[in-house]
Image: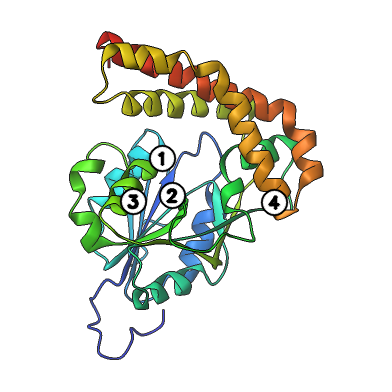
Amino acid sequence: MTSPPTGEAADTVLLSIVVGVRSSEVDPTACLQSIRSQLRDGVELIVVGDRIDGPEDVDGVIHIEADGLVPELWARGLRMARGELVALTAGSVVPEPDWVDRLVSMRSRDAAVVGGAIEGSRSLETTDWAVYFCRYTPYMLPLPSGTDVEVPGDNAVYRREILDQHRELFTDAFWEPFIHRVLRDEGHDLVLDPDLVVRQAPGMSVGGFIRQRFRHGLSHGRMRSEGLTRRRILLEALSAPLVPPLMVARAGRNVVRRRRHLGRFLRSLPVLVLFTAAWAVGEFVGRLRAATGRT
């Protein structure tokens, strides 16, 4: 490990990295190996997941056995984080070799949140590309500039002092779109850095990602229904058939604008439609449960 910057105490935690691992979906080995190889003084790694492989006695590594969706795992890890900065990622992506150093360098930036790019790896198959287009096209290089951007939860770093002011928002799960909305409303800057890069790992199955999309849509539908009248919830639930074409069109627009992966996008389109439909069904069910008072 390298020495901490001049003037820093040896036990100062500059950066906490929280990795949500669902090994039942994608093998997290490459992700964790990449991060472990980059660990340095002042950086701690908190791995939260349903199966944790690797050495248990590495300095600066904390293992938490847990099950749940990745945002739920992040919330568990955030309770343990001690760093000035807190980075989030998932076992389904593999950080580039300079990722940790770039995260630490974010101390010199004024933004509350800095997100990076999510690229596809060279070994992705058609199903993997459908997963990529379903989730990550807004974060495909080249990235948009400015402070009015969305930041990916799977590749983002936060100032912990700001997160600490909003712990009630992620008691159970860290759903970044909702938390980012609150931060923007308070006037905080969210920016994207094209040099902060992770790559999607291969291996997600069609059935596994359909289940994941349904569960994410379910949670999204419940959260979007909070504070609304029963009539309004049911009216919004009726828009469910529009969700898949809107999501596919948004992904396609990003692909066309970046002028990348158009052939892969077209080949993966049938699977992508399945994935977006799973989200729409989950969101519909979530809204119905909210309207009827079910959890």
Which numbered dot is residue 146?
none
Above or below, comparing residue 50 to residue 210 in the picture? below
Structural distance between the alpha carbons of marks 2 and 3: 20 Å
Circle 3: is it few (<14), some (14-19), or many (20+) Cα within 10 Å? some
Q: In the drawing, what numbered circle is on residue 63? A: 3
Q: State how many labels appear.
A: 4
Tell me the quarter of the image containing the C terminus: top left
Is disc 4 placed on a helix, strand or loop?
A: helix
The residue located at (27%, 71%) in the rendering is 13
- Residue 29: x percent and y percent? 54, 51
Q: Nearer the viewer, residue 254 or 18?
A: 254
> Secondary structure under badge 1?
helix
Q: For the residues marked 3 and 4, what is the alpha-carbon distance in whole angstroms?
A: 40 Å
Q: Give, as a three-letter code, the residue at label 4.
A: Arg
- Residues at circles 2 and 3 in contact by the CB criterion of under 8 Å: no
Name the residue tied to disc 4.
257
Label of residue 70 in the image: 1
Q: Toward which corner of the image does residue 10 lie, by quadrant? A: bottom left
Q: Nearer the viewer, mark 4 or mark 2?
A: 4
Q: Are marks 3 and 4 in contact (CB under 8 Å)?
A: no
Instruction: Say which residue appears at 46% left-offset and 20% top-offset.
Output: 282
Rendered image quadrant of residue 287: top left
Q: Is residue 211 visible?
A: no
Mark 2 is surrounded, within 10 Å at the Cα level, by few (under 14), some (14 to 19) or many (20 or more) other residues, namely many
Q: What type is the residue that disc 2 sits on?
A: Gly
Of labels 3 and 4, the one closer to you: 4
Q: Residue at x 57, y 65 (%)?
A: 96
Q: Choose mark 2 or mark 3, whichever is in front.
A: 2
Q: Is residue 31 above or below residue 66?
A: below
Query: Which comes before the other along the chain, label 3 or label 4?
Result: 3
- Distance from disc 4 to disc 2, alpha carbons, whole Å, reads 22 Å
